[in-house]
Amino acid sequence: MQSPFSLVAKPGIQTGLPEGVPMQTRMSKPEFIALIAMMFATIAFSIDAMLPAFPQIGAELSPQDVNRAQLILTAFVLGMGVGTFFTGPLSDAFGRKPVIYAGSALYIAAAALAWASSSLEVVLAARMLQGLGAAAPRVVALAIVRDLYVGREMARLMSIAMMIFTIFPAFAPMMGAGIIAFTGWRGIFLAFMLFSVITMLWMGLRLDEPLARENRRPFRLPLLWGAVVEMVTHPTVRLSIMVQTLCMGMLFTMLVMVQPVYDVIYDRADSFPFWFGAVALVSGSGSVLNAGLVVRLGMRRMVTWSLAAQLGLTSVVLALSTTGHEPFGLFVLWQCSVFFMAGTTLGNLNAIAMEPMGHIAGMAASVIGAISTVLAASIVAPIGLTFDGTLIPLATGLLIMSAVGYALILHMARVEARLEA
């Protein structure tokens, strides 16, 4: 009799088992979903829990320019982008669990280095290494779901896990603020270490290796480079990556500057985690709305309308900021719109880029994520350092990115029309 806690091999799953043969696992479906969601949440926890720590880190490690503390976020994102480039192909070559173990070990070691450091430069280097390690559970978790499930069941499990992942950022700043209150900013890095150890032990004890040894593919750098060349020379894919970079840039720029805005402009540093949580919960509905509308409206139209709306609202914020009027309610609405836009653009742009790349889907997913993340981090870092106690630098940066993104998505429509003709 088949165990209710076993998964069944399906066509297209590279388990090394014939169709219908159970692939034994000690995990029930709810436990599996919880584990995958926790792997996804590594990124959100590592980014959002750090936001309340910016003032303390800046005052202690960079008193001459406290604004440099926000580089802690962009350094992590940059490392994560580089890691995304390699972790998918490496897990195809060496198995899912070994790559997650290696990434988690690097993540924990880097967190320990940041905890012990007395220099902002060392903390930034540690955060970049931490991002590199965090890419492993985030990227390989997707591959594990693909290994064990197909079709609608895979989509259903992914939707549930992503819903949990979407909710988690609402609570991460509150968790970070609570840790800081009891242990100081260094305690957050101890929490990162504990979080990763729990995830690694949970996976190691309860999940069997999902990728059979005979189905692994050697890691070949020329193939990876060939995928990069193919994608950047395909006009639709290239434009999609560019727009995705700008949308991620807007999201990360808001994340980098949102705490200083609440602290310096509105004097709401103490209530910031609660405002951030409320905004994250509300704007999380962007993904739900997108799922309901994208089939009827199409991916490119959803992106076009989202960028147009962002362009209009950001123009209003910038116009008011230049006159010295920066209403708090308007900023909260604007912050919510940026987070909401991420839910209606990033998934669609990724799908647009992946559509012509079905023959190299796994490698394409890693390359697209890596390029867009690294470029976005490179854009965000200098913008974040321009914060001057007003909304003007933030609004100017988002206005330029939304305008260029809107122009590129319109150009994509013309390019696709020419290709079809």
Image (cartoon, rainbow, N blue to C red):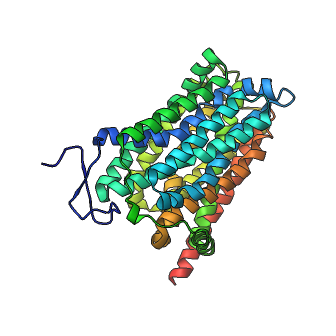
Q: Residue at x 52, y 39 (%)?
A: 42
Q: Residue furthest bottom?
A: 421
Q: Residue furthest top?
A: 182
Q: Residue at x 48, y 34 (%)?
A: 168
> Residue 174: x percent and y percent?
55, 24
Tell me where residue 56 sits by quadrant.
top right
The reply to whether residue 97 is in sight is: yes
Q: Is residue 123 above or below residue 140?
A: above
> Residue 1: x percent and y percent?
12, 48
Name the side, left or right, on which 262 lies relative to 87: right
Tell me where residue 276 sits by quadrant.
top right
> Residue 241: x percent and y percent?
60, 62
Name the side, left or right, on which 40 lies relative to 241: left
The reply to whether residue 343 is in sight is: no
Q: Residue furthest left?
A: 1
Q: How many numbered marks have been drawn onto this rendered protein structure? A: 0
Q: Is residue 220 above or below residue 338?
A: below
In front of the other: 351 or 345:
351
Q: Residue at x 50, y 47 (%)?
A: 100
In front of the other: 60 or 252:
60
In front of the other: 315 or 180:
180
